[in-house]
Structure formats: C-alpha cells, structure tokens
Image (cartoon, helix red, strand yellow):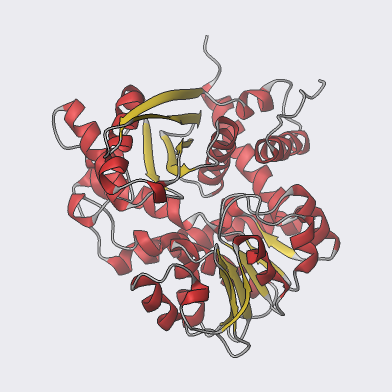
C-alpha cells in the first residue's frame, strides 16, 4: 500500500512515520495501521470571550480523541500560542502509544487553546476555560475523555474544568479531570509525578548499562514543573545538576547548582533562572536556551517544548543519555545525529509517563472515593515505570531496536491487539 503524503506539521509527520514503521515491523495486515493512526474525533471550537476591559476577543481551541480501543481518552489541555490542530493530533497520538506502552487501561487524547496565558488575567483565563469546556462538554466524562494539566495550565484550570462540567451534569464529578487540587479529589504526588518518572527513567537506563545516577552530570532544558522536579529528585540521588535553562537563558555550575535555593528563588517570583543569582549565567535569551546542551554532561533532560532539539542542538550535546521529559523534544533529524553517535535516547512515551500513570491512579481514587497517601502513590508510579522499562529494555535488546523504535512497536502492538480482539463494526 502506498503511504499517504506526510502532513506538513513536523511533529505529526514524525509520530505517524514511527507508527507506520512499527506497523511494518509487526507486519500488520493492510489497513490496520492507518486505522490506528487516524484520530477518532477532532473538534475545533470557537471560544468568544469578553476581556476585563470589556473588549471581545475570540480564541480557537481543539480537543482530539485519538484512540479509545483500550479505554477512555486521556490527555492534557495546553494553553500556548503555538497550539494548532496538527500539534494537538500528534500529542493525542503520542498519548495513545504512551498509555498502551505503560499498560494502562486508557486511550489517547489531547486538547488546547491557541493563546498566551501570561497575557490574560486569572478572571480572563477562567472565562476561556469555562467557555472551552462548554463547547466540548458532550464529549467529556470519566468514561469518555478525561483531561489533565499540560503546558500553560495547572491545578486551578483543572478545578474550573471540573466545576463547569459538574454544573452541566448537576452534581460534582471529580473523575472528569485529573491533576486537580487535593481539596477537589486530586491525588497526592501528582505535582512531582512526571519529573519523578523522568528521573526513574534515568535511573533505570543507567542501571541497564551497568552504572548509577550518583555523580552523573545532568543538564536540564526547562525549569517548569517537570524540569524542577527532575532536578530536585535527581539531586536527591546524588547527581550533579551542572546546567539549567529556561526562556531567560542558561545557568551553570561545574560543582552542581543549588537546586533548593533555585526553587526558593522561583517561588519568590524570579522570572527566570538567570535572574536568581545562582550559578554562572552563560547565556541570556530564549534563542540561547539550548546552549545548555553544550555543557559537559552525562545526561541531558529536555523538559521544555516539542521540537526544541534539532540537528544543531544535537550536535552540541555531550551527554551519553538523553531522557525526554517534554513531549517530542527531539526532531527526527536530532534523533538521527544522536543515534549515529551511539547516544542512548529514552523516548518521551516512556520517560515522561509518570504523569499519566499518576493521573490514572487519581482516577482510581475518584472512582473508589478514596485518597491514598503520597508514599503509596509514588511507589505505584515507580513500580509501573519499572515494569514498563523491563518490557521495553528486554524487547529492545532482543530485537536490536533503539528504545524509541521498541517503544513504538510495543505501543502499536498493544493497540493492534486490542483492535483485533474487539473487531471492526459493522
């Protein structure tokens, strides 16, 4: 069968290509892989909002339900100027592979609104969120599609999502969303879960290669929730965080950055790591943030946005291991450069799966009307990560595949197996 023309969006073209390659490796029958690639539903909605000054504006939002063969859709809501239809589809497809690889009884979904949340007040963000939920209301639900936080959103936004949905239903429905505040049925451990998964991935890949995390030099791009927790937890394992970057630039310290001091500075309202007075500022400006990868290091953790690491950035990298904390941070070109050099890449659909794993645990608590203690939640996240890595590493080794290729094959196989078992109606 002739392959369709690839989409213009690089992230979507990349994941569709990986899924097709996995389908060919698995020798799936004709048409199955195209069914698995195609999203089940793509909603584009108009979001008219009145700003605080009385003016009216209109934003565009999307909610993509990619695959629900193995369970209800699961995926975050992103508020960022770059949000688009194709980006949202690519992220939803990645969620389908991620939940399948992690053996969670969930499907893949994603949503977002094209806006810059920094330019809106809290009241304006609430109006946007409530109108967005109203537009996609009929397709949400604990057994249909369950959103979560993503870039530009947080627990407060999830609280608005829950409330707006609950108003329509007529009673409180905590299970419609995850990553919400504890007071509304959120889970302990959720804030740290994605960063915890990134560090667990680093621990596991080090162990698989006969070494440990202790003493390893780590550079991290992005100091939001994921990057911050990855830095804190990795430092707790004895690693040295020698470089951190964000939109303001790059800071470095050969002896290791004082992460606790940096966290305290950012919590006090410092706009960027370069303004915290910690470490040495080696570059300023968002265009220089990728310079962090040129620092001498053992492990690189890109925890910012997708497509942040291209051929140029890959050429700068000195690390032996790359752990993808963000969704799709490496382009196919960067992948090729690093694979050629023998760099071990732990792909996003495993490395940042701690977040969706904890979201699933939050759903379980909501269904059972329980709240587990934080140690129990963290232990469950770690246990799930370790079980998935064991499958991934063994499959990769036995079949001489990179971790990314192996993860894609395992994810597609789980989706295809469920597809075959359920059959095709009518």
Farthest residue to the top: give it: 426
Residue ID at (50%, 54%) = 353
Q: Is residue 316 left or right of residue 52?
A: right
| Front-most of residues 42 and 100 | 42
State whether residue 401 appears in this view.
no
Point 16% across, 37% down: residue: 172
Left or right: 283 as drawn, with respect to 425: right
The N terminus, quarter of image: top right
Is residue 13 shown above or below 190? above
| On screen, residue 268 above or below 31 | below
* Residue placed most toward the observer, 199 or 266: 266
Q: Position of residue 71 (x, y in %)?
A: 43, 34
Question: Which residue is more in the foreground, 8 or 75?
Answer: 8
Please indicate whether residue 109 sits to the left or right of residue 372 in the image. Answer: right
Can you give x and y, in whole percent of width and height, for residue 206 in the image?
64, 74
Task: Point out residue 342 in the picture as x, y percentages from the top left corner.
Answer: 81, 65
Residue nearest the viewer, comparing 105 with 36: 36
> Which picture quadrant has residue 169?
top left
- Outermost residue to the right: 340
Q: Is any part of residue 371 visible from this angle?
A: yes
Quadrant of the rendered image containing residue 271 = bottom left
Count of picture labels: 0
Q: Residue furthest bottom?
A: 255
Note whether 230 is above or below 139 in the view shown: below
Q: Position of residue 126 (x, y in %)?
A: 27, 41
In which quadrant of the rendered view does residue 27 lie? top right
**Viewed as shown, does residue 27 lie left or right of 159?**
right
């Amino acid at each position: 069968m002739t392959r369709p023309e690839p989409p213009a969006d690089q992230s979507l073209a990349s994941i569709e290509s990986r899924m097709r390659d996995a389908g060919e490796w698995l020798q799936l029958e004709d048409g199955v892989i195209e069914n698995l690639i195609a999203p089940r539903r793509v909603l584009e909605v108009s979001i008219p909002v009145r700003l605080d000054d009385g003016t009216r504006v209109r934003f565009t939002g999307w909610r993509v339900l990619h695959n629900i063969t193995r369970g209800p859709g699961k995926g975050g809501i992103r508020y960022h100027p770059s949000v688009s239809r194709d980006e949202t589809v690519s992220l939803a497809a990645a969620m389908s592979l991620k939940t399948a690889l992690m053996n969670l009884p969930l499907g893949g979904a994603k949503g977002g609104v094209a806006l810059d949340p920094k330019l809106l007040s809290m009241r304006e963000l609430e109006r946007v969120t409530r109108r967005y939920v109203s537009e996609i209301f009929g397709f949400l639900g604990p057994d249909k599609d369950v959103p979560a936080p993503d870039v530009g959103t947080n627990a407060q936004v999830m609280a608005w999502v829950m409330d707006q949905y609950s108003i329509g239903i007529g009673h409180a429905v905590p299970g419609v969303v995850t990553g919400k505040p504890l007071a509304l049925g959120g889970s302990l451990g959720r804030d740290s879960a994605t960063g915890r998964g990134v560090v667990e991935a680093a621990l596991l890949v080090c162990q698989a290669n006969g070494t440990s995390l202790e003493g390893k030099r780590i550079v991290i791009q992005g100091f939001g929730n994921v990057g911050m927790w990855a830095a804190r937890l990795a430092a707790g394992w004895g690693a040295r965080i020698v470089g951190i970057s964000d939109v303001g630039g790059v800071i470095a310290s050969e002896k290791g950055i004082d992460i606790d001091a940096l966290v305290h500075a950012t919590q006090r309202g410092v706009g960027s790591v370069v303004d915290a007075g910690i470490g040495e500022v080696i570059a300023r400006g968002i265009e220089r943030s990728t310079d962090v990868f040129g620092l001498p290091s053992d492990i690189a953790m890109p925890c910012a946005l997708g497509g942040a690491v291209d051929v140029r950035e890959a050429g700068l990298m000195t690390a032996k291991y790359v752990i993808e904390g963000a969704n799709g941070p490496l382009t196919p070109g960067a992948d090729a450069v690093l694979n050629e050099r023998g760099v071990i890449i732990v792909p996003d659909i495993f490395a940042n799966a701690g977040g969706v794993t904890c979201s699933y645990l939050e759903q379980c608590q909501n269904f059972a009307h329980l709240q587990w203690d934080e140690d129990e939640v963290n232990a469950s996240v770690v246990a799930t990560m370790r079980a998935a890595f064991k499958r991934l590493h063994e499959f990769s080794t036995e079949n001489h595949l990179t971790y990314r290729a192996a993860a894609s094959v395992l994810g597609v196989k789980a989706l295809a197996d469920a597809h075959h078992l359920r059959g095709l109606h009518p």
